[in-house]
Image: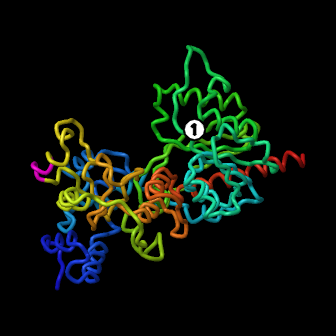
Amino acid sequence: MIFNDNNLSLQKYWTFTPKSVYFPKLSLYWKRHMITDVHNENYYTIELLADILSESKRTIESWVKNGKVKATHCTKTNKTLVHKEEVKDHPEIKKLDTSSWDQDLLIKPQRKFNLVELFAGGGGLALGMEQAGLHSVLLNELDKSACRTLRHNRPHWNVIEGDISNVDFSTINDSVDIVTGGFPCQAFSYAGKKLGFEDTRGTLFFEFARAVKELQPNVFVAENVRGLLTHDDGRTIKTIKDIVNDLGYELIEHKVLKAIFYKVPQKRERLILVGIKKEFANKVTYQWPSSYKKVMTLKDALYKGELYDSDVPCSIGQVYPERKREIMEQVPPGGYWRDLSDELQREYMKASYFLGGGKTGMARRLSMEEPSLTLTTSPAQKQTERCHPLHTRPLQTREYARIQTFPDTWEFQGSMGAIYKQIGNAVPVNMAAAIGRSVVKLLNDIDSVEHLRTVS
């Protein structure tokens, strides 16, 4: 049997026939064979290139149409591919080509740096910080299932379960070098005046700021959604900056990091805020982590390769109702509702069919040749579908975890819904580790400054 780029009907058969039908082992073999054959590291799909360059898909398509970049069409995947040589001069591509990721891996703490993490969730940020060499002395989390996950995987961690407003940081006997966490985005109450630290009481940012004020770390790192920058017409981030300044810290220029640049097979973005004690701020320079040398795809997450040394294990996961499964079977890898017939579009989308906007998350099947879309807390949500590329079902929990770059040894506790929530809300581990290494370098530099000051 021969597979070639023009044999679309055979491709569709192997893609959409359940593996339990007709030679299950062979079908899985051919599926994987075809994925490997399609994946070519010399090319970017238009969709992936748009994500890397922060351009719209329409813009990239116009470049191809106008001859600005040359492209080829892959009949096997029905994708337009742009050769990497065509875009090598773009700054984002150069970051990949000149990556110092391997050198960053050599960064190690000069001493034990103690860390306190707030809003720890299922452990993505904490695990990444641990991989970077930081030592957690306290983690706080309200969700019971997430706390079970943290304790199950790291029995030695000091996990404080409950409302952060009840946490007494004076119980920490060791000095704390860094405070981390992702406080939820909340509006402050304005009365036409500049808000101080006490004016934000009742918000979760206040509790994060309280930890910084009481623990006096040399550095803090806060992560959030990029929407924080424009939240409440920009007044929320301005208030945060003012209070950080009042607490004696300098907030360096914020940055929205794309997970795809940090060895994460997912199109996820996080706003990162780094604060440094003012006494050191003008003596040290924080360097953002280097990009990884390539962009990982969903194939890298689910199969043995550079990210994992085995295929993804089976796990629990949501399932589709029969009619929804029948409709989703008509969506090709990388496709969405527009790939359905008009009749099925109307049936599936109902009232949404008549609304404006692209609604690209509806009836969405992922592609093996691209990173996953940003994971949500439920892969079967109608507006934000995350369907497996080859099997007609939502992504399973272990597949979710791999896309967030959790190791297979990290075992999540709680109900299936609780597990999806922990993984979907997490900071990708590899991204957290990259940030952690950049912070370790910063803390090493601060220690060097302190040493020189002591000697002098």
- Res. 365 image quadrant: bottom left
Return the x and y of residue 355 as percentages of the image width and height. 20, 36
Please give the range of residues in magenta: 341-345
Name the residue rendered at 51%, 63% in the picture: 406
Name the residue rendered at 66%, 43% in the picture: 220
- Residue 88 sits above or below residue 28 on the image: above
Name the residue rendered at 40%, 71% in the picture: 314
- Secondary structure mainly formed by the magenta segment: helix
Magenta run includes residue 342: yes
Q: Which residue is mark 1?
A: 253
Name the residue rendered at 49%, 44% in the picture: 256
Coloring applied to the structure: rainbow
Left or right: 207 as drawn, with respect to 408: right
- Which quarter shows the N terminus? bottom left
Left or right: 216 as drawn, with respect to 373: right
- From this viewpoint, is residue 128 visible? no
Left or right: 381 as drawn, with respect to 341: right
- The answer to which of 346 and 44 lies nearer the viewer is 346
- Res. 109 image quadrant: bottom right
Count neighbours of disc 1 (C-alpha within 10 A) and say few if under 14, some if 14 to 19, many if 20 or more: few
